[in-house]
Amino acid sequence: MSKFVEPINLEISPASLGQGEQAILQEIALQLYAQNIFTFGQARRLANLSVWEFQQLLGQKNIQRYYNETDLASDRSFGVTQSSLL
């Protein structure tokens, strides 16, 4: 049985098209995050940015940072993993 996947609309600005692959990936990542399709981590990785850089980019584009229980669980898991490395 196949699942129906709703189409999504993404708009890439002409300016981004002229700036190359990295700018296009960032714009796609921002839109997928803003539409709550990608998590923060997924969008950040697609954009190939650090946590700090992606947070700054969200601020520059006036995109609200979403934080839900999945994000909290991911952060907790990361904290446990990192503390075990110390």
Image (cartoon, rainbow, N blue to C red):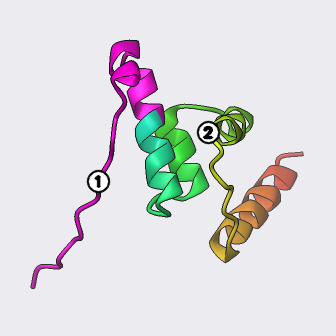
CA–CA distance between discs 2 and 1? 18 Å
Span of residues in magenta: 1-26
Q: Residues within 10 Å of mark 2 (few under 14, many from 20)?
A: few
Snapshot quadrant of residue 18: top left
Q: Position of residue 67 (x, y in %)?
A: 70, 66
- The answer to which image quadrant residue 81 occupies is bottom right
Residue 78 included in the magenta stretch of the image: no
Q: Position of residue 34 (x, y in %)?
A: 52, 55
Judged left or right of residue 30, residue 75 is right
Q: Is residue 63 above or below residue 1?
A: above
Whether residue 21 is visible, yes or no, is no
Residue 9 is labelled as: 1
In the drawing, does residue 47 fall left or right of residue 1? right
- Dot 1 surroundings within 10 Å: few (below 14), some, or many (20 or more)? few
Residue depicted at x 45% and y 24% = 23
What residue is rendered at 72% in x and 35% in y? 56
Examine the rendered structure and indicate whether residue 12 appears above or below residue 62: above
Q: Which residue is mark 2?
A: 61
Vertical arrangement, residue 50 with respect to residue 67, above or below: above
Q: What amino acid is at disc 1?
A: Asn
69 relative position to 80: left or right: left
Quadrant that contains the N terminus: bottom left
Image height check: is 12 above or below 70? above
Q: Position of residue 35 (x, y in %)?
A: 46, 60
